[in-house]
Amino acid sequence: MSRIIDKDLKELSVTLYRMGELAHRAVLEALIGCIEGKEAHEEVREIADTLVAMADHVEDKAFELIARFQPVASDLRTIKSYMKIAYDFARFGRYALDISSINKQIGGLRGCEEWINSYVKRMSEKTLEMVRSSIESLKSHNTQIAEKISEREKEVDKMYFEFIDELIKCGATIKCAVSSVLIVRYLERIADHAAYICESIIYIATGRKEVLR
Amino acid sequence: MTVKFDIQNLNAWFGSKHVLKNINMKIEENAVTAIIGPSGCGKTTFIRCLNRMHEITPGARVSGKVIFNGVNIYDNGVDPVMVRRKIGMVFQKPNPFPMMSVYDNVAIGLKLNGVRDKKILDAAVRRSLELANLWDEVKDDLKKSGTSLSGGQQQRLCIARALAVEPEVLLMDEPCSALDPIATAKIETLIRELAKNYTIVIVTHNMQQAARVSDYTAFLYLGELIEYGATKQIFENPKHELTEKYLTGKFG
Amino acid sequence: MDHYKFRVIKDRLVQFLVYLALFSALVPLFSILYEVIARGFSTINIEFFIRPTPTVGETGGGVANAIQGTLITIGLASLIGVPIGLMSGIFLSEYGESNLSAAVRFLHDVLNGVPSIVIGVFAYTLITRSIGFSVTAAAFALAVIMIPIVTRTTEEALKLVPMSVREAAIALGIPRWKTTIIVVLSSAKKAIVTGILLSIARIAGESAPVLVSMGFWRWWFAGLNRPVANLALNVFIFAMSPFENWVVLAWGSALVLILLVLGISIAARVLIRERY
């Protein structure tokens, strides 16, 4: 049965999907910029700003729905989670912006050691895949996809710590060390937020607050 | 949880119509328990079984146990009049006794139970009206007719009347459904205050009211108890699919 | 347009007929009042109110004893009739619908329709035969006439009290019979009182049953097993007598009687109005 609130909930979820796509693109562009040395900062900034505006809009809309409809049960959990997820997507944008700032400011990973480049590349792929997963589970409200992300989040965490160890052991130029550590740090945070998103999906569907990190 | 009512296998009929089916639940003392559910699900019948009012309808029948203060109120030796003195009731439409003053409305329960001393009656009337948050509004003219009050005031008068005989429980059957939002809010606040010292069971078809006012919520559907738990849990994360559907308005 | 004019004419015609009927109904009332007041008014003086019925040949005299007698008779009748009528009314209204209540209601209706002379004969047979012509017998007859009226008005007044009042009373943990008190208090007590007053007004004017069960009496109250004087009977006996002063007293009695009934009816009206 179609309820008045359903239309607004649909709108919200459509907004969230768009945010997901934009967030993914931002992170992708920023990483490509760093790894392959392309100029992408302005574009990433634009997307990041859009994401922040969209997150604000989602929050406002969610508050309106709460005030007007006093939602309960799954509706309430959905609205609460949408607010969190919107914030998480905006954070993707922010991190993407931070990554492309490194590129702009100190030149990213241009001319750095091969092992660093390939490590960062691998971590980026894993992280981007997690971002895509989180968007996928949001679209389908699929808790199984959401749960699988826990494994990969732990992998990314492991990679982060291992990289730091490697770097200290092997050493590198200051510029490459600073760039790569920062990038890897942001990748780890992006992975965290992707896991947050999946936790929210599980909360919407089951009401359980699981920790996937 | 101190259990005030231990309801076991409660069934109720109107003639051959089976209205309540095997209800089992424990109602906590000095808390507000809300009974929600779609029209005709047996909510009113249920609370009327708690103070033995259901059986006064011709053709009505009850089976099962309702254990109150250690005694099954449906046991053979139990006097329904005593049960009703301990378990008071407030009805959907405010029904102060017509042709009687505010004072008399509140005092009559005591008077007919043998209290004659005017001082005691005065004190009891004042106490009950204060408990019902009505004293300040009527203290200047207790002799005026009960029916000359506004709807919300009349309902609070009915609450005072019920409280005057010093019950332990207050059963409320959709007490606000005939009232405007401001009067409703006053009564909801009153309910929360009363819950400190009385066990309150409230039937309501207004889910938001149940959410605002109660500590525990029971969802009844077609005479069966579908789900019963802490209000926070029921409204955030109901366990049963039917409950979820009802709360989110997805009933066809 | 023709149709409209025709309708207007029909309307006016019906209005005229209605007013004519009203007039015809009021004329007897006013003519009676006029006659009684005109002829009876002249008799009203102090003597009228303090002297008893004069004996044959005595001049002057009054209806003081008749007033006393009428008051005693209707007082006694009320003492018997009102409680019985009230309780019957309460029973019919409060104690459920059953074959018994249907029978009671039917019997009351029948009783209502029994000619008052028959009731008088009944009282004669039951009471007069054993203790003689007496005010007790007359009061008994009048009580029997009163009962259906009081029962009916009481039942109607109580039926107007909504079911919710009874439920609220039961929910207070009050024993069943005491909840009836609440219902009675919650009802228009004034309607019940009005019903009682109107039944008194009715019996004040009854002459046939009084005559049969008690007979005529010229003196003051002399005991419950003796008759008393009665205003209605005075009218009956004196009007046809050959004595001039008796005839005059008849008109006077009639006037007092009408004033008494009128007074009671007005009191009943005033009581109803106070409710609003």
Image (cartoon, coloured by chain):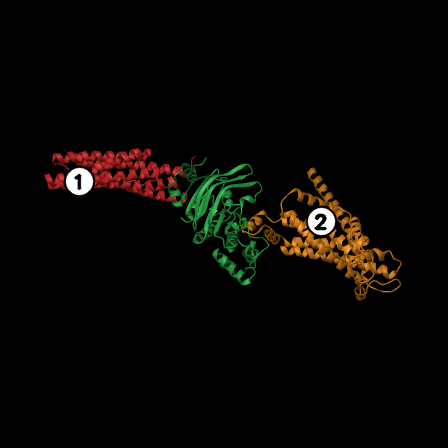
Q: Is residue A118 visible in this depiction of the protein?
A: yes
Q: On the picture, is A108 further left or further right than C35? A: left
Residue A171 higher or lower than B68, as above or below: above
Percent across and percent down for residue B171 are 49, 48
Q: On the picture, is B91 further left or further right than A15? A: right
**Gap between marks 2 and 1, in whole Å?**
103 Å
Percent across and percent down for residue A12 are 35, 38
SS at mark 1 in the image? helix
Q: Which residue is found at the position 41% from the left and 47% from the top?
A: B215
Outermost residue on the front side: it is B77
Colour seen for chain C: orange
SS at mark 2 in the image? helix
Chain letter of mark 2 equals C
Quarter of the picture containing the C terminus of chain C is bottom right
Q: On the picture, is C64 further left or further right than C160? A: right
Label annotation for residue A161: 1
Badge 1 density bin: few <14, some 14–19, many ≥20, Cα 10 Å: few
The reply to whether dot 2 and dot 1 touch (C-beta < 8 Å) is no
Residue where numbered disc 2 is placed = C148
Residue A21 higher or lower than C132, as above or below: above
Q: Is residue A172 visible in this depiction of the protein?
A: no
Badge 2 density bin: few <14, some 14–19, many ≥20, Cα 10 Å: many
Q: On the picture, is C155 further left or further right than B169? A: right
